[in-house]
Amino acid sequence: MKMGNGRVSFKSLYRRSVFQFRNLVRPYLGSAYMKEDIYLIRWIRVTNFDVQKAKQRLLENLRWRKANNMDTINTEDWSDMQLEYPLYTDTVDKEGRPVGTVNLGTWNFRRAAVTGKMPRMIRYFYKLLEESTQTVIRNQYKGANVTEFSLIMNLDGFNAIQHACPACLQAYRAFVTAYQNYYVGYTHKITLINTPPIFKTVLDVIQPLFTARTKEILKIFGPNKKEWQEYLDKEISRDALRPEYGGTRSD
């Protein structure tokens, strides 16, 4: 659509695309938040305003959510996982974005694999993404100007046996696939700290899956605390982070 000067009006393109897209997908949308412009535009942007492709992506998302019972994942009992595989979604950055923190270096991926618990670990990763996303949505309903969340993963303690065994790698692939395909446009930054050289084993597996957006937002830091501390300080107040992430939070 062109204006008198021959240039496309982004506002006009935006409105037209959202209107067309909503009419295409309205019969399939159940949750109230999915009917909001701020949700619909994510699928339009990721497909470069091609509403038919956006419809395909959204319907794929809905099928995945139904197959994995995502609407109820946050009400399930995760006490066993939280004890052995700690993660938190109770932090915000300086702009009010939710921040998930994962002490990944303490997780024993191999134990999960050999005890048949790998599917539950993968679902636990899904819970992290869903809980972070729903926090964004709740804050939007409260009037906050927040559209994204961030993740920080501490790899201190990461080793080849517990974290990079062949059976372990499926968890990383599942996380990247879910985050890129089903939580489109929700992630501001993914930051890895205390990353050892052996993590390249995992990167070699998941990097071919990376979209351009993932390459842009993924920041990987080694064990030099000064480097990653300086980066995190720009994003998040120290009193909002626990000590293992360079903060002063005591709970």
Image: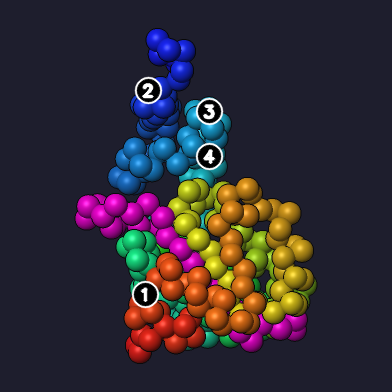
Q: Nearer the viewer, mark 2 or mark 4?
A: 2
**Nearer the N terminus, badge 1 or badge 3?**
3
Residue 131 placement (x, y as % from top left): 40, 64
Disc ID at residue 12: 2
Q: Which residues are magenta?
A: 133-161
Residue that badge 1 annotates: 237
Residue 142 inside the magenta-drawn segment: yes
Residue 241 inside the magenta-drawn segment: no
Residue 242 placement (x, y as % from top left): 42, 83
Few, some or many residues within 10 Å of mark 4 (<14, 14–19, 20+): some
Residue 77 placement (x, y as % from top left): 41, 75
Q: Nearer the viewer, mark 3 or mark 2?
A: 2
Residue that badge 4 annotates: 46
Distance of label 3 from label 4 (alpha carbons): 9 Å
- Kindly identify the residue that appears in the image at 43 percent across and 12 percent down: 5
Disc ID at residue 180: none
Residue that badge 3 annotates: 50
